[in-house]
Every structure is written in C-alpha cells, then in structure tokens.
Amino acid sequence: MKIGVLTVLFGAQPLEEALDFIASAGVEAVEIGAGGYPGTAHCNPQMLLEDERKLKEFQRAIFSRGLTISALSCHGNPLHPNQEKAASYHKDFENTVLLAERLGLERVITFSGCPGDSEGARYPNWVTCPWPPDFLEILKWQWEEKIIPYWKEAVEFAKTHGVRKICLEMHPGFVVYNTETLLKLRAAIGEEIGANFDPSHLFWQGMDPLVSLRALGEAVYHVHAKDVALDPQNVARNGVLDTKIYSDEMNRSWIFRTVGYGHGADFWKAFVSTLRLIGYDDVLSIEHEDSLMSSREGFLKAVAFLKDVIIAEKAGEIWWA
C-alpha cells in the first residue's frame, strides 16, 4: 500500500510548490482535484486538454518528483435539479474523464448526485425515511427517472474513453451514501461503479467501516484516509444528523479529524488489514478536513501515523503451516 494525498488542501499554493512539500513528507501518490467541489486550482482539465505543452508540464511536475497520480477527483452533483448547475457538474465529469484518458488513468472520483423531488424542483431532495409515503414515491421517481438513466450514459462515456472505475464517495446528501445504495447502483449499472471508500462518512452515520469493506469487496476502487470524532454528549442529546456549521466544533455531534484523532491505531491497523483481505493493495489518500488543525500539521501528522499502520510489502509465503 502507498500513502497519497488529495492536493486540494494545498490549493492556495502553486502546484509545484505543493508537490515539493508533499514529496518531502514521504508521500508517494497524489489525488488531483479536477473540477466540481474540489475546484481546479492545480488542474484545469479543459486547459490541459487544449494545450499539449501545458499537459506535459503538468505530468512532468508530478512524475519528476517520484509521485504517481492515484485518481482525478471532480466531486459534484450532476443530478442537481437546477439544470445549469447539473450541466456544469456533468461537464466537469466529462472533462475529467477525457483528461484521465490522456494521462492513462482508469479511476475518476465523484459523488453519485441527488435529484430534486420532481421535474419542477429547485433543490436536491435527499430521502432518509420511508414515511409519510410521499418519500418512497420521491425515491422511486429519483432512481427510475434520474439516477439510473444518468449513470448508464455517464458510464458508457467513461468506458469509451478508457475509464472503467467510477469511484463514488458514499456521502450523506447524495443518493449513494452507504453500502446498500452503492451496491444498488452498481447492480443497476455495472462493475464500472465502485467506491471511493471514506470511513469518516460511515462512522458518523453509525456504520462499521470494516463490515462495509467486507460487503463491498472488489467494488472498493480507491480509499480516503480521513477520520471523524463523535461527541458522546452531543450525540446523546441530538443524534448524528447535525446541520450546525463545521466551525461550531463544541456543539456539533461530530467533526472530521486527522487520522488517529478520531479512532486510534487499533482501528486503522484493522482497516488496512481488511483492505488487504478484500484484495485492495493500493493508495490510501489523505483528505484533510480537520478544523482543529492547520492543513500542514494535519497532513504531516496523518503521514506519520499512516506510515506506522499501512502494510507496505507483499505478503510472503505461509512458511509456518
């Protein structure tokens, strides 16, 4: 396994300056934001696709430092009921796929998206309960009329351009948010649909990431290393569905943390061991969203922590049996 990082946390720095710091920390791979919510600070697909010289400079900046690209990320909501927003996110997805093709990458990371409740909706409608019965009607309409048709076409486009692993991050607010919904979409669309597995989003929903890993198995295509801490008193009082802003750490039920600050080494050792059990022996990409630490400190602490818990070498022969 290798340690990687989503470079968005260094988006305020020029790419080469960020890459120097990343490489100096002993990281081996980078995940690059290419549109959508991650933005294009380090990678503007449309510009790179139109200028061969800039594309080669982009590649040289990464590869000359001994780094590889684990994936391109364009998290967005291409199913947004606002057609202008949906079209923008969809264009980001297509441009990211086209750039991945030019770079020889097979993985693109994004969200599944979330439609509204009808053709006339203005905002996404994330359904979380089956009653009153209106909610099940909305859910049925979303999957049959929006979600499945969109992803059938999107996957065909990706396959045409050599991208065969669409890594959907299971995230509340979008239609794929847990193990069951990821597998539901995969069953409807095909094996091109898989997971960008981020355990932090599962923890705060009350899931066990290790159980989810086993259930997803070969559908795990990319992994984020991000932690979360739940506040027992706030959870006991309000539950885990929390709409308070992320900077209100004292009152929130949970906050994102650097790996090791939400769950200790015992969990993360079990996590990487389970990854190996299901056949994933690739990059753990650090995503820093810890509001209690600077990007620099959170990143460096994550790297140091993961170096002690990842399994870097191939397993040897079972010589004792």
Image (cartoon, grey):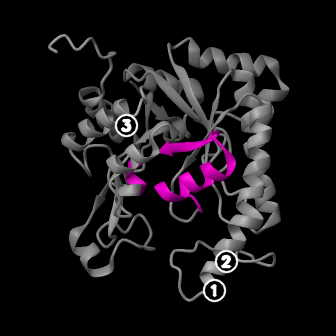
The kind of secondary structure element at disc 2 is helix
Q: Are marks 1 and 2 in contact (CB under 8 Å)?
A: yes
Is residue 100 visible in this depiction of the protein?
yes
- Compare residues 67 and 316 and report the one nearer the observer: 316
Q: Position of residue 283 (x, y in %)?
A: 45, 29
Lower position in the chain sequence, tag 2 or tag 3: 2
- The span picked out in magenta is 175-201
Disc ID at residue 134: 1
The picture places residue 231, in percent across and down from the top left corner, at 25, 66
Residue 200 vertical position relative to residue 307 in the rendered view, above or below: below
> Looking at numbered disc 2 in the image, what kind of residue is underneath it?
Ile
Q: Position of residue 29 (x, y in %)?
A: 49, 24
Q: Is disc 3 placed on a helix, strand or loop?
A: helix
Please give the name of the residue rendered at 67% of the width and 40% of the height, measured from the top-left corner. 40
Q: Nearer the viewer, residue 22 or 238?
A: 238
Residue 310, quarter of the rendered image = top left
Q: What amino acid type should be assigned to the residue bearing mark 1? A: Asp
Q: Residue furthest left?
A: 320
At horizontal 51% and vertical 78% (from top left) the residue drawn is: 129
